[in-house]
Amino acid sequence: MIKSLTLNEIQYLAHRLAADTMEWDEPIPQFETRYANVLESCIATPFIRFEKKSLYVGMNLKAAVLFYLLIKNHPFQNGNKRIAVASLLIFLLKNGKWLRVDSKELYNLAVWIAESPPLAKDDMLSYITRFIKKHLVDGEVYNSSNQI
């Protein structure tokens, strides 16, 4: 069974990780300043079911939807791409996986998604899913090599 991220995990893990390690010139605002219900919707959407069937099947697609929505739906005043990157990694690690990819390449993907037109959503989700599949490794592999 695929494990979802919770609001508390994003607050304590992803938000804190992004704020501590990817600060740059733009600070990430306090978690409490997020836009009400937008973050919650981003977390819930990958797990939506209709007539007992998942709308987003498989961990890679669920991860892609989470990543895309955290960037495009802008649940925070600032730092959405950084929080999306951290949340994606935590979601995958929670499910025993990791991405072996250069951190700059992953961030560039986030920038590209942010700049994409909303009508390209399906194409973007397809691309993100393929990107994840290409770079996905077992979480144990990450732990033994300490590489992204």
Image (spheres, helix red, strand yellow):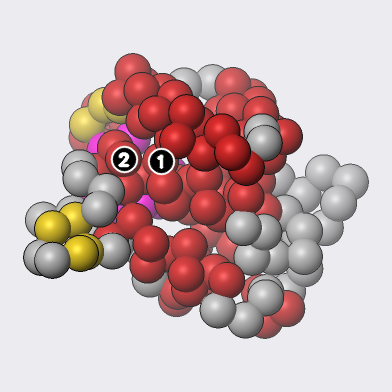
Let me know if residue 83 appears in the view.
no
Query: What residue is at 23 percent from the left and 59 percent from the top?
Result: 3
Please, is residue 49 above or below residue 87 in the view? below
Whether residues under marks 2 and 1 lie with C-beta atoms below 8 angstroms apart, the answer is yes
| Image quadrant in which the N terminus is located | bottom left
In which quadrant of the rendered view does residue 99 lie? top left
Residue 64, disc: 1
Query: What residue is at 67 percent from the left and 75 percent from the top?
Result: 35
In which quadrant of the rendered view does residue 110 lie? top right
Q: Does residue 4 appear to the left or right of 41 in the view shown?
A: left
Tell me the residue that label 2 is attached to.
61
Q: Does residue 51 appear to the left or right of 95 in the view shown?
A: left
Q: Which residues are magenta?
A: 89-98
- The reply to whether the magenta stretch includes residue 115 is no
In which quadrant of the rendered view does residue 146 lie? top left
| Image quadrant in which the C terminus is located | top left
Residue lying farthest to the right in this orientation: 25
Instruction: Judge the density around disc 1: few (<14), some (14-19), many (≥20) Cα neighbours within 10 Å.
Output: many
Number of numbered labels in the structure image: 2
